[in-house]
Amino acid sequence: MSVIWVLFFIGHFWTGAADDHSVLVVDPPSFLSGITKNVQLTCRPPVGEDVARVLTLQVIRERSLDGASDPVATFLTSAATPLVEKFGVLLNASVSASYDAAQARDALLRVDLPDPAEIAAGRYTCSVETQDSHGLLHRYLSHRTTLTSLFLNGSVPLFYQAILLELRKDLDTLTSDLNKVNVQQTALEQLNNESESKLSAITADQLQLTGLKNDINAGVNGVDNQVTVIRSSIERLRDITPVEPVNFYAFFSSQYAAVGNNANIVFNSLEQHTDTSYSTSTGVFTVPVNGTYFFRTGVTGDTATHSASIVINDKPVASLVSYDDYGGVNQATACVVVKLTVADTVRVVKKTGSTSSVFGYYPNAGHNHVSYFVGTLQWSTSHAA
Ligand SMILES: *[C@@H]1O[C@H](CO)[C@@H](O)[C@H](O)[C@H]1NC(C)=O
Ligand SMILES: *[C@@H]1O[C@H](CO)[C@@H](O)[C@H](O)[C@H]1NC(C)=O
Ligand SMILES: *[C@@H]1O[C@H](CO)[C@@H](O)[C@H](O)[C@H]1NC(C)=O
Ligand SMILES: *[C@@H]1O[C@H](CO)[C@@H](O)[C@H](O)[C@H]1NC(C)=O
């Protein structure tokens, strides 16, 4: 500390002229407390002077209240080890310095004021003491440079204008970003529109396909119906195809047959018989297959009057009646076409007339088979009618 005061004491040797100022750079020249991060004060020797050695560099603050000057920091290069003294305790100053004896005019003392408070506002001076190449001592003072607190200067609105400018720049950036996003959004929307139009094209195709499918289904149904019709035609064809031929032709081998009234006329001989359906012992035909049958009987009697019926399952379905006033040989016939099922019975039952009067043949002129019973299957029905 004493060294500094000694140097101050010898300060009166200085010979600095008006233009021979040392250099003080204050950056930035104003601050807003709480916002500004750092103010830097850099103190250098004068430019263009004969500087062989630098002895001291000092930053001085002029108090705004009483005008007195305080040193903030002093750099003593003349000491064996260059020494930095920091006085700006109140200012929270951080001080650094550099000095190279071979490059004396590059000497530098720097004071940093981090997070400056209002108290940092004031006028600053850089004082430099040198020795020229002739050994003469000099002291140079820089211009007094004001560090302004924008708050104290009442210029806060200006500061906010600066902030506003920054915000405007941000806004411009954001607006341009937004425009880019809008362009992308439009592109996406276009893509979306294209997708939608493709989707509706696909939907239309789908509808068409559905229509086609319905048409095909309708066609298939039509074909199905035709198949059903054809099937039923085939069934019918099958129905009317005789399964096996069924027929018989029965008569009497004798000239006369005695048949009681209400008894079966038992034609006891067969001219034609395809199977065993007709019984020559009972005169009953038993239906072997479902189908439509034709029966005919002819009965010749030797008395004037006789009658008989074709009886199916005890029900007369066709009858013959002969009546002759003159009392000769008479023949009458009856026939029927009827649908029958398996096990139905068909027979001829004599109703009235002489009990020994049925002619088997009539000898005059060799008439054979004057009484007979025939039956034939027209077509079979393989299932229920
Ligand atoms: C120095 O630091 C103290 C503690 O952080 C603070 O209260 C004070 O305002 C500061 N002074 C200046 C001048 O920055
Ligand atoms: C201080 O305020 C005055 C007027 O209010 C202005 O002209 C001047 O530029 C201000 N100083 C700084 C360093 O902003
Ligand atoms: C997308 O379609 C909508 C509705 O049809 C239309 O208003 C819009 O302009 C279209 N967008 C593009 C980017 O084509
Ligand atoms: C014959 O017809 C009867 C009655 O309709 C029926 O029950 C039977 O199954 C038929 N038989 C055949 C072989 O079709």
Image: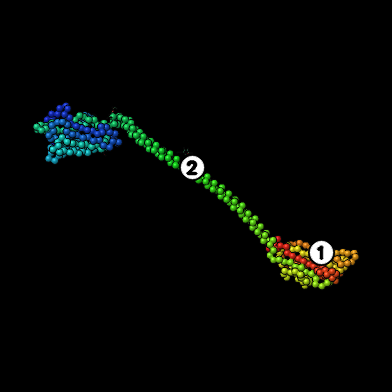
Q: Measure the alpha-carbon separation of dots 2 and 1.
A: 89 Å
**Residue at horizontal 36 percent and vertical 34 percent from the top:** 172
**Residue at horizontal 85 percent and vertical 64 percent from the top:** 322
> In the image as oriented, which residue stretches furthest toward the front?
365
The spot of residue 176 in percent (x, y) is 37, 36
Mark 2 or 1, which is nearer the eye? 1
- The kind of residue on which mark 1 rests is Thr
Which residue bears the numbered disc 2? 197
Observer able to see residue 132: yes
Q: From the viewer's perspective, tell me whether residue 14 is left or right of residue 215.
A: left
Q: From the viewer's perspective, tell me whether residue 188 is left or right of residue 7.
A: right
Location of the C terminus by quadrant is: bottom right
Instruction: Name the foreground residue: 49 vs 125.
Output: 49
Say whether marks 2 and 1 touch (CB < 8 Å). Answer: no
How is the rendered protein coloured?
rainbow
Location of residue 254 (image quadrant): bottom right
> In the image as oriented, which residue stretches furthest toward the top?
18
The spot of residue 329 in percent (x, y) is 86, 67
In this rendering, is residue 383 above or below 32?
below
The spot of residue 124 in percent (x, y) is 21, 31
Location of residue 192 (image quadrant): top left
- The kind of residue on which mark 2 rests is Ser
Q: Is mark 2 within 8 Å of ligand 3?
A: no
How many numbered callouts?
2
Give whichever of discs 2 and 1 has the lower sequence position. 2
Which residue bears the numbered disc 1? 333
The spot of residue 45 in percent (x, y) is 16, 33
**Residue at horizontal 69 percent and vertical 66 percent from the top:** 244
